[in-house]
């Protein structure tokens, strides 16, 4: 009994920190509280005597719970693709604490929380843990299932997005998806006219070294050259979200081989970037469309 009381006190000493971590990742105080409670349940199923750094262990557990939650949220499409303000508590009559959540949102910065909502799950976790809580990438890597270098890249991309423009709204995502899927359909069916219709006259294609070893050209320019190259080729490619932006992937039997990053302007593709390097692929957060 004394050991249980000691463990409960130790957990309570870390609760505020864990709530802050979870809230920055999830953008909702009720969900953050659920994540913290789940961490407590997992701690009770663990031999605490084998945990050398309780605070670090709890932070890792909460981060993994939040990452799973963010990925499940995306896969269920519970949220629209457009970024939105974090959901505040429904009210005291629902057993929640709207004033507490509002105060927490204010302390973090509501604008920052809105931008964080637009990040891919692994990007968000890497950014929050490193930039807000100073966790080293050697520890972040295993949490997001990446190498430390790939975790650093995730945080770096997130940092650029946080400091830059907000993510695209849902309407732009949908429009760009239509362009990409029209391109892939035309490529698969060998429709030269269809390819030319969605390619900018000055479109550029660039491929990394790994893609080049697979047969891709280092660089191509011009709609006709690019259309001829892709005519009949994209048989295994499917549209997907790459770090929150519309692109395409080639992943036979679930094994990711190539990611195709796509830039669209005025309804036409202006640039395609083929990525096949394993470490770079590991740093891309990919979500399939329904």
Image: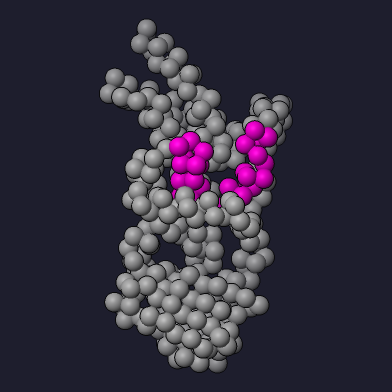
Give the number of callouts. Answer: 0
x 37%, y 7%: residue: 2
Counting from the top left corner in percent of width and height, residue 58 is at 41, 29
33 displayed left or right of 38: right
Q: Is residue 74 visible?
A: no
Q: Name the chief secondary structure element in magenta.
A: helix
95 displayed left or right of 278: right
Counting from the top left corner in percent of width and height, residue 117 is at 59, 48
x 61%, y 56%: residue: 164
Q: In terms of depth relative to the viewer, which is nearer, 126 or 19?
A: 126
- Taking the magenta stretch, the answer to whether it contains residue 30 is no
Q: Quadrant of residue 284?
A: bottom left
Extent of the magenta region = 105-134
x 36%, y 46%: residue: 141
Counting from the top left corner in percent of width and height, residue 129 is at 46, 40
**Quarter of the rendering occupied by the N terminus:** top left
Q: In terms of depth relative to the viewer, which is nearer, 157 or 82?
A: 157
């Amino acid at each position: 009994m004394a050991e249980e009381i000691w463990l409960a006190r130790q957990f309570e000493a870390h609760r505020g920190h864990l709530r802050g971590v979870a809230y920055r990742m999830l953008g909702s105080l009720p969900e953050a509280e659920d994540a913290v409670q789940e961490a407590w349940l997992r701690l009770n199923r663990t031999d605490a005597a084998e945990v050398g750094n309780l605070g670090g262990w709890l932070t890792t557990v909460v981060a993994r719970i939040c990452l799973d939650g963010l990925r499940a949220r995306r896969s269920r499409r519970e949220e629209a693709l457009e970024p939105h303000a974090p959901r505040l508590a429904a009210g005291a009559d629902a057993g929640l604490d709207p004033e507490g959540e509002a105060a927490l949102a204010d302390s973090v910065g509501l604008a920052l929380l809105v931008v964080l909502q637009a990040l891919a799950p692994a990007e968000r976790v890497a950014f929050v843990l490193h930039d807000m809580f100073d966790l080293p990438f050697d520890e972040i890597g295993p949490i997001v299932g990446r190498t430390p270098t790939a975790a650093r890249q995730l945080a770096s991309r997130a940092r650029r997005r946080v400091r830059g423009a907000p993510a695209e709204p849902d309407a732009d995502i949908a429009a760009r998806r239509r362009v990409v899927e029209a391109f892939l359909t035309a490529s698969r069916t060998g429709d030269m006219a269809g390819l030319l219709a969605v390619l900018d006259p000055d479109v550029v294609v660039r491929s990394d070294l790994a893609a080049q070893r697979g047969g891709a050209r280092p660089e191509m320019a011009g709609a006709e050259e690019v259309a001829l190259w892709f005519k009949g080729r994209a048989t295994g490619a499917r549209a997907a979200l790459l770090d929150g932006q519309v692109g395409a992937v080639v992943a036979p039997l679930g094994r990711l081989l190539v990611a195709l990053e796509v830039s669209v302007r005025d309804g036409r593709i202006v640039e395609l970037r083929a990525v096949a390097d394993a470490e770079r692929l590991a740093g891309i957060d990919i979500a399939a469309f329904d």
